[in-house]
Image (cartoon, coloured by chain):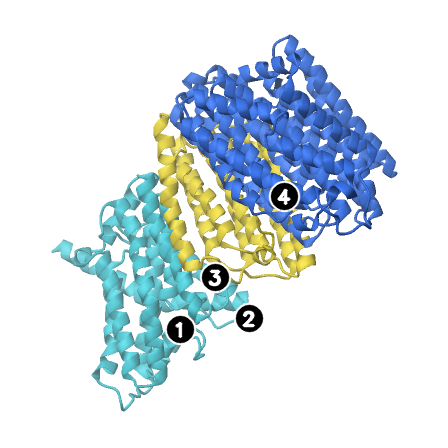
Chain colours: A blue, B cyan, C yellow
Amino acid sequence: MSVVYFLVLLGIPVAGAIVCTLLRRRRWFEYVTVTSTGLTFLATLWLTSLVLQGATIMTPKGWFFLDALSVYLLVIVSGSTLVVALYSIGYLHRQIRNKKVDGSMLRLYYILLNAFLSTMMLVLVSNNLGFLWIGTEATTLATAFLVAFYERESSIEAAWKYVIICSVGIAFALFGIILTYFSALHVVSSADNALNWSTLIAVGKQLNPDILKLAFVFILVGFGTKAGLVPLHTWKPDAYSEAPAPISALMAAGLVNIALYALLRFYILVNKAVGGSFAPNLFIIFGLVSMGVAVPFILLQRDYKRLLAYSSVEHVGIIVFALGLGTPLAYFGALLHMLNNTLAKLVLFLTAGNIRIAYDSKIIRRVTGAIKVMPVSATLFILGVFAVTGWPPFGLFVSELSIVTAGFSAGNVFASVLFVGFVATVFVGFIYYATGMVFGEPSRHDKKGDGDTLSLVVIAVLVVFLLVLGTMIPTMIYNFIMRAAAVIQV
Amino acid sequence: MIEFASTFIVSAIQILLMLLATPLVCGIIRKTKARLQNRRGATIFQPYLDLSKLMRKEVIIPSTSSWIFRITPYVVLASMLLIALLVPTIFAPVPFHWMGDIITIIYLFAAARFFLALGGLDAGSAFGGLGSSREMSIASIVEPAMMLAVFTTAVTAGSTDLSIIVNRLSTTQASIIHPSHVLAFAGLFIVTIAETGRLPVDNPGTHLELTMIHEAMILEYSGRYLAFLELASQMKLLIFLSLLANMFAPVGMAIDTAPLSLIVGVAAFILKVAILAIVVALVETANAKLRLFRVPELLMVAFVLSLLALILYSIIGS
Amino acid sequence: MFDTQTISLGIEILAATILVTTFLIVSSRSLMFYVRLFAIQSFLLGLVALLVAVGFGETHILIAAILTIVVKATVIPIALSKVIDKIKVRKEIDFTINITTSLLLCALLVILADSVARPILEAQRMSDLAVFKVLPMSIAVMMIGLFIMIARKQAVSQIIGLLTMENGVFLSGLSITYGMPLIVEVGIFFDIFVAVLILGVFVFRINQTFDTINVDTIRRLRH
């Protein structure tokens, strides 16, 4: 029976991709994709209710499984994809009108969007670490042509850089997985189970700690590249600024979480097997370094999509830092921050996409007076900026506050002070650039026009959600996050 | 007394075999190359005819030259013959193996090269000096590479005496063949190509001033002297091929003086050297001459491979 | 048929030959030569997998062995040589690090690889692993693959570096675990194959838009 769940979950986007290859009319791509992403989102909600009621769901051979942590991310990722699919409709229509996109490109876009969703689902439902790897590499491959979508010189370069750097990183991760498998083979009797995360967790204490430490270093490099941890983040600004806005949004909201999820699974495993402060310290260091390196790039930025990319680097740093702190409050903060960051990044990248179309420029200084050119998008953008910099009453304030509290109470005073310093500096830089973009007098009046209603409504809903998360977290969501955090606490 | 006689006989066979086989190997390589280039080519016995013709020709000595010019062919040929006595071909240990080990052999090669370079300079022509300087600069990388490659097998067998190495490798289990030998073999093979002046390092077939190395040094020699130098350089090739064949694949090597094992030894030796000669011909056909300043890169490959062989040996252990 | 010792020896010798091919890639400038060496390297890797499958009764790796020989040693090299034919760039011209230095650095990498491999091998008891000696060599192949990507600028060279790295990872897997479960190996193969196809398409596109595939000339995007 359990196989059916996974077949449904992975099957819907795959079917969506296949149907898109067969269709010819533009409208149909949109209908199919919205249906497939919507159905996937509904399916994840349904599975979430099942998981939260009962225990974990696992296929007979243990290849796939669902626990509170994986369904938490499933909901985040499939929800983001649905948002992006809804936004893409209007965005691509405008790009077609601007003669930047034609029919065959449109088909490719929707096929790959569906494929991208299915690969992300594959990562999230994999219990077998080999599948986890395969899924992660597949996300790179599915997005490669999406990053190079506009076929400009710079976008092909960005895509090349993205595929090469991520493939190298992921090759390291594969070596780490092989090492894990190696140490598991000495403990687990059946070779087929020796790659299953659930099996490994069960025998965690018996695994050889020295090998797992080394394996974790390779895995941190591998999936860290995918997540965009400094110094492996170099592909990120290029890819995010060259990809179409909805794709950048989905990479910042979905792909980052996928990579963090993969890292998290190994983090749990290594903590169980090695204990002590090995993995947590690595996470704290990498987290702080990522935040710290992002700061100057945010302060001295000319390109607003790159600004957002570095913000993504910073927030990955925040989440990894929080996971490294290792207290229940920090885990709660980290998971909540994953959700908050996802919402804020969606708002920012999608509104930035509208700004990009209206001004036809990615340069911050060329964009002035957006509030007059596109009142709704600009308002949402500035709200998103306040949210992403951790301003109350938005959700990120709550999650960052709980992370800092956890940091101080865990005794990491120095690290926590640095954390606060970085967040504050980023805030200054962001507000400076964003106010310059939104307020003032527009230089050109000819392109006056906002995004389409549907996408603006969707983005507004996200902003409201961020407000809700920042003022009073619904009990249901609170309990859900606590369940997921309990998985980390093994 | 009997021991002395057998020592003498075996050594005589060895030297005779080397002398006789030397032009033949050269002939095989030339024939193979000709066939690969869709030519009929001269008979494989052509080098014998060339040498005998040269022996009969008049010797012309440049008026500017000194006694060094005249002594060089003898020194070079004598060094090669000495080495030929030390290198195991069909029988290990060779009777005179106590005379010198690997290091002696490398220095005998160096001595020959030194005199050859002097001879090239002494003739007083521009090309001689050019060839000499090229030869010495190549030698500066080739020699360490060769030492490292040979040391890998020396370490495996626990001796620097070539005969003992070959003997140990051929009498013990196959497990003594070590993965690092693959790298040492590759290194030594490149050294062979460079040392014996084959393509892509040097072209034995032309006298093009831009590229020639070995040919430039012996440009002023003629008649008997040239025959000696040609024979010496061909013998050098054979010596290297037997090093390659016997250090890394001592199959069929005779370890006693029984007639049967000697015959097997001779047959195995001829077979292995012929195969290697054909491989050399293939390499020569497949590659174009490298520009001179690119040659150090190739030699560096040989050096690094040989170095790596030693590293790998210490990493993997026996 | 043969005892374990002989088979391990064969595997070790093949692995050493694989290491030789990677050094030859580092020593060369011709893109076509890279591709041929990569084909030989993958073929040898396929033989290693075959030996593991037949010699140690690990039949699940048989398919991976065949896939290696068919995909990595045949299809990918043919595709890459087609790419080289089309883009009419045959030589790596200027290097970040020159060949001589590269070779010496790669020799150092082998020592480094050993220092990575040693703790892994010391941590587990080695009695039940017949081919653990291959691990340092495989890590060295990985590192040299990465080195090729750093030191070479042509797009095709970077692909070759990446593939060499993958070969090193596969070899390490064969050495310490006799390969991953079949379905995982097949998935990995599929991913690598698709990655090469995508990168190949990018090489074409880069070539069309810039008239060069020197990755350096397109580094216009800065922070």
- Residue B283 circle label: 3
Q: Which numbered disc covers residue A433?
A: 4
Image x and y of residue A278, in percent:
40, 27
Asked whether B272 or A442 is in front, the reply is A442
**Circle 2 Cα neighbour tier, 10 Å, few/some/many (<14 / 14–19 / ≥20):** few
Q: Amino acid at mark 2?
A: Arg
Secondary structure of residue under mark 2: loop
Mark pair 1, 2: CA separation: 17 Å
Residue at image coords 42%, 55%: C102
Give the alpha-carbon distance from disc 1 to disc 4, as whole Å: 84 Å
Disc nearer the start of the sequence (3/2): 2
Asked if the residues shown at circle 3 and circle 2 are in contact, with their CB atoms under 8 angstroms apart, the answer is no
Q: Are marks 1 and 4 on the same chain?
A: no
- Of the two numbered discs 1 and 3 on the same chain, state the one appearing first in sequence: 1
Q: Which three-letter amino acid code belongs to the residue tagged 1?
A: Pro
Name the residue located 32 percent from the left edge and 66 percent from the top edge.
Answer: B139
Which of the two marks, 1 or 3, is nearer to us in this view? 3
Pointer 1: what residue? B47
- Secondary structure at badge 1 equals helix
Q: Which-is-in-front pick, marks 2 and 4?
A: 4
